[in-house]
Amino acid sequence: MTAKVIDGKAFAARVRGEVATHVARLKAETGRTPGLAVVLVGEDPASQVYVGAKGKQTVEVGMASFEHRLPAETSEADLLALIDRLNRDPEVHGILVQLPLPPHMNSDLVINALDPAKDVDGFHISNVGRLGTGQKSMVPCTPLGCLMMLRDLHGSLSGLTAVVVGRSNIVGKPMAQLLLGDSCTVTIAHSRTRDLAAVCRTADILVAAVGRPEMIPGDWVKPGATVIDVGINRIERDGKKKLVGDVHYPSAAEVAGAITPVPGGVGPMTIACLLANTLTAFCRAEG
Ligand code: GUN
């Protein structure tokens, strides 16, 4: 069996198209434009690439993009003052503070200073609690993108066995909450899980979010399962730089029913969902 390849790039383009259509209609009807503010502190090269991509795609769907690039030595008090200004700015409907922050800052404190209604990352403690209790919340973008692809593929996820490998606050835990919300039977596995191979083999839906290159081989995949690979690992092989996931793609694609490639799977969905979340925040604020 060769797995169906889930085209995240095409899916993300569709989501962005739907967001753009909705934004154009809102602008025509209300004269108002959804706005996303992105805050980057410091010069981390990977973060600069992400922030640039976010700004470009925000403008492409017709939203207003506000970029705040601050020097690495910015004080926490100055960052909190900026967040306070953005919280009160009626033109800003979503705020994203790019992580990681420099080591002299307390990320939890900064994230929890955001207005939860503008927290398009879904990282504020109030959004985490609301997701965990099934209340209306902002949902973290990467797991939301995974859920959208899974729903598109399966229709209902009810009753399926899902294994999430990885317990991060950004992906693993919210992914598990979302799958539970769709009535999956959910296991969160991690580096201390005993017989991880056997646990993975129970999964109808296997989500890998551990950040270890090609850690999950094909013989850990149940035949016909759907494999969602969140990993983006830069490796060097045969003298060439390469991007690989947390799943060993060639062997897993022989066994799985469907699989996301790396690159071109989950990755493109994250920014598309950020834009969808900004639209949601706008509609809740002004709708
Ligand atoms: N850094 C890496 N991924 C993310 C993300 O999803 N949101 C934010 N704010 N920072 C990140």
Image (tube, rainbow, N blue to C red):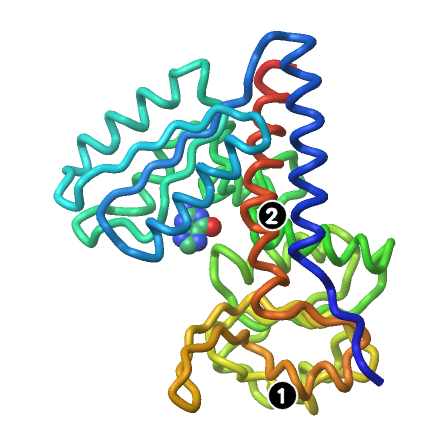
Residue farthest to the top, as pictured:
30
Other-residue count near label 2 (Cα within 10 Å), few / some / many at <14 / 14–19 / ≥20: some
Quadrant of the snapshot with the N terminus: bottom right
Residue 188 visible in the picture: no
* Residue nearest the viewer, comparing 179 with 251: 251
* Residue nearest the viewer, comparing 120 with 238: 238
Quadrant of res 186? bottom right
Q: Residue at x 14, y 37 (%)?
A: 75
Image location of residue 95, percent across then percent down: 43, 32
Q: Is residue 118 above or below residue 259?
A: above
Q: Helix or strand or loop: what does disc 2 sit on?
A: helix
Image location of residue 134, percent across then percent down: 67, 42
Is residue 126 left or right of 16 when viewed as pictured? left
Q: Is mark 1 within 8 Å of ligand 1?
A: no
The residue beneath circle 1 is 217
Q: Which label number is shown at residue 153?
A: none
Q: Which label number is shown at residue 132?
A: 2
